[in-house]
Image: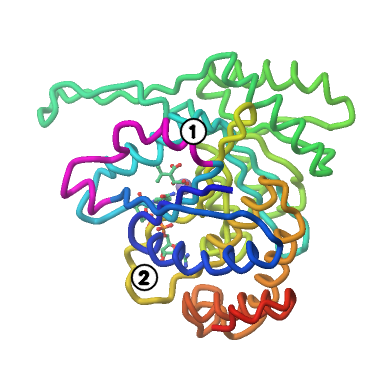
Amino acid sequence: MRIAVVPGDGIGAEVVPAVLPALDLLGRAFGLDVRYDVFGWGADEWLATGTGLPDGALDTLRDEYTAVLLGALGDPRIPDMAHGRAILLGLRRGLDLYVNYRPIPLPSGDTIQLFRENTGGLYSGVGGTVSRGTVAQVAIDESVYTRDTVERFTRYSLARLRELGCRRAVLVHKANAVPNTGRLWREVYYREAERFGDVETSDEYVDSFCYHLVRDPARYQAVLAPNLFGDIISDIGAALMGGLGLAASASVCPETGQALFEPVHGSAPDIAEKGIANPYAAARCLVLLLDHAGHAEPARLLDRCLDEAMRTDARTPDVGGHGTTHGFMAEVTNRLAAATGDGRSAA
Ligand code: NAD
Ligand code: IPM
Ligand code: MN
């Protein structure tokens, strides 16, 4: 496993280095050939050189790395987030990572499997501004979906959610107010659903879906959503889980196997540099990464140790503890070391 590590900005650059020792330990204990290189893409580089994703970066990632682990991007000095679009959206679109899997494990023990389309819709980059700064200013961001884009996403997501044991899926859309893409999504979804007779499929308007999601999450097993709705739903999902510090995600291209793992949260400037950012989401990204690479056993062990550590006071303040970023991960690696007999890790 060769991993391109992009810590990024704010708490991204705190949580990512904090979780890597756990990966090292698992690599030693399970005989995995894990190697990673760190890339300094982010706000500082953007401000110093104007570079987001350097020329050739996508080719290097495709040719030499199995996965990208990214912390977060976002910096108060770049209020329009231009570097974030260049790097993060550049990676998602450039590597054609069209499925963004953002599982929502609920306190009840059930998990809602959320699949977000990750390349199109309002994120397609089609649009523009004219007469900027005058009363005549026109601003356009187009929501662009092709049948092919919706088809490949829907087909993969329905197959994957069934593999994950779901027997109910819901498509979220806004076809009453936004009819063209809404119609395309509904048509393609129900056409694809014919291949999955044992999955009960329905669709809901995104507004009433959000209402029901908050009031009765148990109503849902699996959710398919266009790009922007999926973005928003994943933050509601994080709130249902217990906070943004807990939610992990994987962006994948099923055909090439390329994948990018990142927490759902951002760079959290309000708590950056205090040492209290919750590293759980970033560590759960490692669980998703290990699973993606076919290493189920270390994935389950890490998952278990994370959940055990979460029940101690080492947990960080956002989830009611008094711990620190590094203190929580020390609690996790001590448990990993005890479970695997690795003496070198005790922090
Ligand atoms: P945010 O997710 O960074 O923070 C929202 C709230 O959740 C804050 O109060 C923050 O302190 C808290 N929080 C988030 N992660 C946490 C963690 N691991 N531990 C403890 N508390 C945590 O959202 P925001 O404040 O709207 O955005 C900040 C910047 O991040 C913006 O520039 C935004 O564009 C960017 N952003 C980037 C990504 C990404 O890189 N994937 C995702 C979302 C936002
Ligand atoms: C996320 C973030 C990104 C998104 C932003 C930072 C571009 O909110 O990963 O959820 O909208 O996808
Ligand atoms: Mn988001």
Disc 1 target residue: 63
Query: At which x and y percent is residue 184?
Result: 60, 16
Using the image as rendered, state which of residue 289 and residue 84 is in the foreground.
Answer: 289
Badge 1 or badge 2: first in the primary sequence: 1
Disc 2 target residue: 271
Q: Is mark 2 within 8 Å of ligand 1?
A: yes
Does the CB distance between marks 1 and 2 fall below 8 Å? Answer: no
State the residue at coordinates (25%, 43%).
Answer: 80
Vertical arrangement, residue 291 with respect to residue 159, above or below: below
Q: Which residues are magenta?
A: 43-65
Using the image as rendered, state which of residue 36 and residue 5 is in the foreground.
Answer: 36
State the SS at label 1. Answer: helix
- How crowded is the residue under tag 1: few (<14 C-alpha within 10 Å), some, or many (20+)? few
Query: At which x and y percent is residue 120?
Result: 48, 26
State the residue at coordinates (45%, 30%).
Answer: 93
Q: Is residue 259 magenta?
A: no
Query: At which x and y percent is residue 255?
Result: 63, 26
Which of label 1 and label 2 is nearer to you? 1
Using the image as rendered, state which of residue 269 and residue 134 is in the foreground.
Answer: 269
Disc count in the image?
Answer: 2
Query: At which x and y percent is residue 315?
Result: 56, 78
Vertical arrangement, residue 65 with respect to residue 272, above or below: above
Q: Main secondary structure of the magenta part?
A: helix
